[in-house]
Image (cartoon, rainbow, N blue to C red):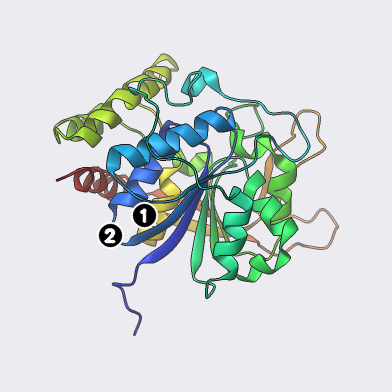
Amino acid sequence: MENTDKKEKMIYDGDPGHDDVMAILLAAGNPRIDLLGVTTVAGNAPLEMTTRNALITMDIIGADIPVAAGCSAPLVRPLYTAPFVHGKSGLDGAKLFEPERKPIKKHACDFLIDTLMESEGDISIVAAGPLTNVALALRREPAIEKKIKQLVIMGGGRFGNITPAAEFNIWSDAEAARILFESGIPKVMCGLDLTYQAVATPEMMEKITMLHTPVSEFVNDFMTFYNANSKRAGKNGAPINDACCVAYLIDQNVFTTRHLRVDIETKGEFTYGMTCIDFFRMNSGKELKEPNVYVGDKLDFELFWDMMISAIASLGQE
């Protein structure tokens, strides 16, 4: 019989980022997760800022979790950041400061390779930014393909949020995404179809505010900024995209999935970075490709926010 008390070992790779920080808080504050490290990549903001935001988060929650800085640009394309969503700092709205903690002296790719190669193949990776770090680590050490338990990706979907066709994380480094989607690593994709259901509604934000802890105040500050951007776009709150990946590792009942074929477009003039999802098993006269990704579908909103609020409540307590 499976031991349900066993913790899920996880490395978080991302570009903090408001929703990245929410994902890190969920991982650090849930007893089902053993967060082995955070690796940072340029994406929402330049690498220096995403790394600083991760370190500030660790300072605020008092966690001695290693943070390793990774790639400062995509594999092929120039870096494109998202200050129009996350502000110039990547975490606008928060009261930012110079963190006491420092990144470890090991590059994120080396941290990924070393940690995975020393493991028993029981570590999952949540990849919630451009996929540069993980793809580069796989290219440098192909043996990690068999060492990754599963790769839970925040990216893609049937529509875009940076172009009509493409979601930001995949579009930022589609070449890296293609490497991983064509690999044999077990994959779960949390695309925009799913993550846009994980909205930080006023009711959920009120529950966080009422916790009255330093961590909840930190969350309230940066989420006020993040939500304001979404409300200007006519939404009821910001989607907490990246935390969906962590929630899945805690309890797979948090959303349903469909096993589908997903390929990454890297050459299209209008479709670069698109996740081409074969919902209807269409081959157009070509050899039918086998499904390679479990694609997230329907979110259990109440379960997701129960996890999120419980994690925030557990952090920063004396």
Q: Label 2's element?
A: loop
Image position, residue 291 (x, y; %): 66, 62
Front-most of residues 301 and 88:
88
Marks 1/2: CA–CA distance: 16 Å
Q: Which mark is residue 227?
A: none
Q: Residue at x 63, y 71 (%)?
A: 146
Q: In the picture shown, does residue 136 fall above or below 101?
A: below
Image position, residue 13 (x, y; %): 53, 47
**Does residue 44 appear in the picture of this structure?**
no
Locate residue 309: give its quadrant.
top left
Front-most of residues 44 and 252:
44
Q: In the picture shown, does residue 217 fall above or below 306?
A: above
**Dot 2 amino acid type:** Pro
| Residue tagged 1 | 254
**Does residue 126 appear in the picture of this structure?**
yes
Locate residue 99: give its quadrant.
top left
Q: Is residue 191 left or right of residue 98?
A: right
| Residue tagged 2 | 31
- Image quarter of the N terminus: bottom left
Image position, residue 133 (x, y; %): 63, 47
Image position, residue 84 (x, y; %): 53, 17
**Dot 1 amino acid type:** Val
